[in-house]
Image: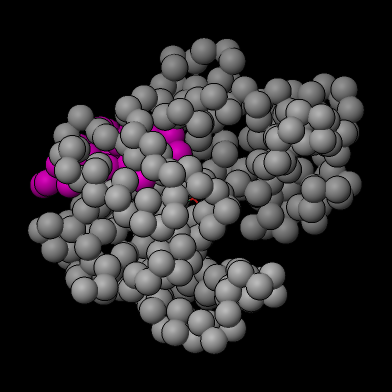
């Protein structure tokens, strides 16, 4: 029987995960509480598929059947038959908890509930769930179709079989699952925090412009993207929330401190690519910076 994958949140990550799941044959139901987000998610996914066809990675004849495997809905009840539901909404523990409480009321008793959180504690998010043993972290990276790594995070209550099943699903989707303890920032968001922070500091101190900072790290450091271009791609709201979460979890350790420039980007709505402006005004890596 076809795997049924529910996704909550039709943003950058939800859309990417939906695409990968559908490409691997799953039936997918994407649920978002905003009609505009559902519309944008469909556009993003359509654009990604057309791009794959253009690059010869997907046959054009696969487009219609693939689109037919994905339902877009504002109605959580449509997730009732899912084998696994992956949440990819705003990085806010209170909002995520509300969503999972509502999900528990509609999904099957054996449905796995997973969060794509970058930085929140899986153990904490599970507090209040009727069945915390079926809840785990399932952390994909952006852009989902291109990034192999998936952190599978076991909270204190997560059943080992649930983490194993998620790792199996990720491997079936061509990913590289890595079992991770529920520590702040997991692996990647802990190691990468100073990478972003030092990029912001260098820019704020006027050492050089954003393009130079990114080029140095990209062309000489061997990173696929420099810290500022990468933060534009992630979304500054998400990146700032992750930075704040990791900083708080490590009791304010200086090296994890979020930067004032990040706060300013969020306050001014310069959220990066998804907003059309961020560090770069058209959010393209070689463009002139706004700040
Ligand atoms: P986004 O801002 O692109 O999309 C979030 C989506 O969630 C929006 O479509 C919004 O309408 C929807 N949403 C918000 N509240 C909702 C609710 N109560 N019910 C249903 N839908 C709701 O965010 P993005 O970047 O996709 O991030 C989502 C999650 O994935 C966050 O937890 C983030 O930390 C994590 N993440 C993000 C990465 C990135 O590079 N952007 C990388 C890895 C993880």
Residue 39 spot, x, y in % from top left: 53, 75
Q: Nearer the viewer, residue 271 or 84?
A: 84
Which residue is depicted at the point 53% across and 82% down? 63
Q: Nearer the viewer, residue 213 or 60?
A: 60
Which residue is depicted at the point 20% across and 70% down? 80
Residue 247 spot, x, y in % from top left: 50, 22
Q: Quadrant of residue 172?
A: bottom left
Q: Quadrant of residue 108?
A: bottom left
Question: Where is 222 relative to 279, above or below?
Answer: above
Which residue is depicted at the point 31% across and 65% down? 5
Query: Magenta segment, which residues?
Result: 118-138
Q: Tell me if I can see residue 74 in this picture.
A: no
Is 87 covered by the magenta stretch?
no
Is 130 covered by the magenta stretch?
yes
Q: Tell me if I can see residue 276 in this picture.
A: yes
Q: Nearer the viewer, residue 44 or 269?
A: 44
Which quadrant of the rendered structure holds the N terminus?
bottom left
Residue 284 spot, x, y in % from top left: 79, 53
Q: Nearer the viewer, residue 275 or 163?
A: 163
Colour scheme shown: one colour
Question: Where is 253 relative to 130, above or below?
Answer: above
In the picture, measured across the screen, residue 210 lies left or right of residue 163, that is right
In the picture, measured across the screen, residue 20 lies left or right of residue 55, that is left
Which residue is depicted at the point 34% across and 34% down? 179
């Amino acid at each position: 029987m076809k795997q049924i994958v529910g996704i909550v949140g039709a943003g950058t990550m939800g859309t990417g995960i939906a695409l990968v799941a559908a490409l691997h044959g799953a039936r997918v139901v994407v649920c978002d509480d905003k009609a505009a987000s559902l519309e944008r998610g469909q556009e993003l996914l359509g654009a990604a598929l057309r791009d794959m066809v253009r690059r010869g990675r997907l046959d054009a004849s696969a487009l219609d059947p693939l689109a037919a495997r994905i339902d877009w809905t504002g109605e959580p009840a449509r997730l009732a038959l899912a084998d696994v539901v992956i949440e990819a909404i705003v990085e806010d523990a209170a909002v995520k908890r509300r969503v999972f409480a509502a999900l528990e009321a509609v999904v099957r008793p054996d449905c796995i509930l997973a969060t794509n959180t970058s930085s929140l504690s899986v153990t904490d998010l599970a507090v209040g769930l009727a069945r915390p043993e079926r809840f785990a972290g399932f952390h994909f990276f952006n852009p989902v179709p291109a990034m192999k790594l998936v952190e599978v995070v076991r909270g204190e209550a997560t059943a080992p079989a649930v983490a194993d099943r998620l790792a199996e699903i990720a491997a079936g989707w061509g990913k590289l699952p890595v079992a991770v303890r529920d520590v702040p920032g997991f692996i990647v968001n802990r190691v990468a925090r100073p990478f972003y922070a030092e990029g912001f500091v260098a820019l704020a101190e006027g050492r050089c412009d954003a393009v130079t900072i990114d080029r140095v790290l990209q062309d000489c450091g061997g990173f696929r993207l420099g810290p500022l271009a990468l933060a534009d791609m992630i979304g500054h709201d998400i990146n700032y929330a992750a930075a704040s979460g990791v900083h708080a979890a490590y009791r304010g350790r200086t090296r994890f401190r979020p930067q004032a420039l990040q706060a300013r980007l969020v306050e001014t709505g310069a959220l990066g690519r998804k907003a059309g402006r961020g560090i770069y005004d058209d959010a393209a890596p070689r463009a002139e910076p706004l700040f």
